[in-house]
């Protein structure tokens, strides 16, 4: 489904829609002049939203060069080049210096081509001490055996983890004060009305748009590829909306401040990055807690109560086939 969305000429926000990205801005206190990074940014739609609505300076990275080309072309055409910058790059080797962003956001495709732990460490590395790290990720909502995980990962072109696993990776990378929200339900406390987090391909586009998207898919993958994409879209949509095996979660935390910094600081004055990394051990007492102002039945309370999770299962094999997020070399 997301592969087809990315082939559309229409610029669409990722799953969760404008309500999710407004919530990210509110949770991180996003404001004018801040530096914001979005990794696995696609065409840069969510980053453009932050720039236009909150006056930030935006940077985006995606492993797919065609997405970056589209993002740069749009930026030039709409005279946003002074506030939006894009680069092709891997999530586990971000092309930035240490500690330069106030807010970093890892989108769904963050770990489709690398180890999730490496991608999370890179997000934290480029975040200022005291700055915010946000993940918007697919998570397993029910126990899934290893073989089915592998098959579903191939369908998705992404590597979902359990929520407790994403939280463990963040803590190990030096992120504290974790807060989580479940955006999988049709109606949650974070949305003003019922909304589908994973709309069907058939519901998103008009008939002429669908024909155009499938034509571009044919030119890229051939008829066999188009058929495979449509079959996978139906299977993934069923899993997301009926079986509820997968969900969409927002996870937010702060990079631990430097030893000499103020715990309430936004990290802008930090200069000793090495000291920040050395002192970025997670706080067991703070991790896994949820602010009372966001607690609800739909998400906001941590399922694991802040306890360290059991050892993670063996890594899911690299995804194969037609990826939802990968570049041409992976197709």
Image (tube, helix red, strand yellow):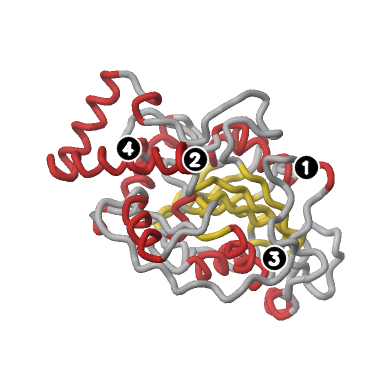
What percent of the width, then of the height, locates residue 87?
A: 43, 54
What percent of the width, then of the height, locates residue 142?
A: 53, 54
Give residue 81's mark. 2
Q: Quote the CA–CA distance across marks 2 and 3.
A: 31 Å
On screen, 178 above or below 200?
Answer: below
Q: SS for tag 1?
A: helix
On screen, 260 above or below 232?
Answer: below
Give residue 175's mark. 3
Q: Quote the CA–CA distance across marks 1 and 3.
A: 19 Å
Residue 277 or 284: which is nearer the viewer?
284
Task: Please rate how many residues cluster around mark 3, counting C-alpha atoms within 10 Å: few if below 14, some from 14 to 19, many from 20.
Answer: many
Mark 3 or 4, closer to the camera: 4
On screen, 102 above or below 6?
Answer: below
Q: Earlier in the sequence, mark 2 or mark 3?
A: 2
The residue shown at (42%, 45%) is 42
What percent of the width, then of the height, locates residue 281?
A: 73, 76
Q: Quote the CA–CA distance across marks 2 and 1.
A: 36 Å
Q: Earlier in the sequence, mark 3 or mark 4?
A: 3
Looking at the rendering, in which quadrant would you find the C terminus? bottom left
Q: Residue furthest top?
A: 207
Q: Is residue 121 left or right of residue 67?
A: right
The residue shown at (84%, 69%) is 261
Q: Earlier in the sequence, mark 1 or mark 4?
A: 4
Determine if residue 311 is in view. yes
The residue shown at (21%, 35%) is 216
Would you identify the image quadrant in which residue 239 lies?
Answer: top left
Give residue 66's mark. none
């Amino acid at each position: 489904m997301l592969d087809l969305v990315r082939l559309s000429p229409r610029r669409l926000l990722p799953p969760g829609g404008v309500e999710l990205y407004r919530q990210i801005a509110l949770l991180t206190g996003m404001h004018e002049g801040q530096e914001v990074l979005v990794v696995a940014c696609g065409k840069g739609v969510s980053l453009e939203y932050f720039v236009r609505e909150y006056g930030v300076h935006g940077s985006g990275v995606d492993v797919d060069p065609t997405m970056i080309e589209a993002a740069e072309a749009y930026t030039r055409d709409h005279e946003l080049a002074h506030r939006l910058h894009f680069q092709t790059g891997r999530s586990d080797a971000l092309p930035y210096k240490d500690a330069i962003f106030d807010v970093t956001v890892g989108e769904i495709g963050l770990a489709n081509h690398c180890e999730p732990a490496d991608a999370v460490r890179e997000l934290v590395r480029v975040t200022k001490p005291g700055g915010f790290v946000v993940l918007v990720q697919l998570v397993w909502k029910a126990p899934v055996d290893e073989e089915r995980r592998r098959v579903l990962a191939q369908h998705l072109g992404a590597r979902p983890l359990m929520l407790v696993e994403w939280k463990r990776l963040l803590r190990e990378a030096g992120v504290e004060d974790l807060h989580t929200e479940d955006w999988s339900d049709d109606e949650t406390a974070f949305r003003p009305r019922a909304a589908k987090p994973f709309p069907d391909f058939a519901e998103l586009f008009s008939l002429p748009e669908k024909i155009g998207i499938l034509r571009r898919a044919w030119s890229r993958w051939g008829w066999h590829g188009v058929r495979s994409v449509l079959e996978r879209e139906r299977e993934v949509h069923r899993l997301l909306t009926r079986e509820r095996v997968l969900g969409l979660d927002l996870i937010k935390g702060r990079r631990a401040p430097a030893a000499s910094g103020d715990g309430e600081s936004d990290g802008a004055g930090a200069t000793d990055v090495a000291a920040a990394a050395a002192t970025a051990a997670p706080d067991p007492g703070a991790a896994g807690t949820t602010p009372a102002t966001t607690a609800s039945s739909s998400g906001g309370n941590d399922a694991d109560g802040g306890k360290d999770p059991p050892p993670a299962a063996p890594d899911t094999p690299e995804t194969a086939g037609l990826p939802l997020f990968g570049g041409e070399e992976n197709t």
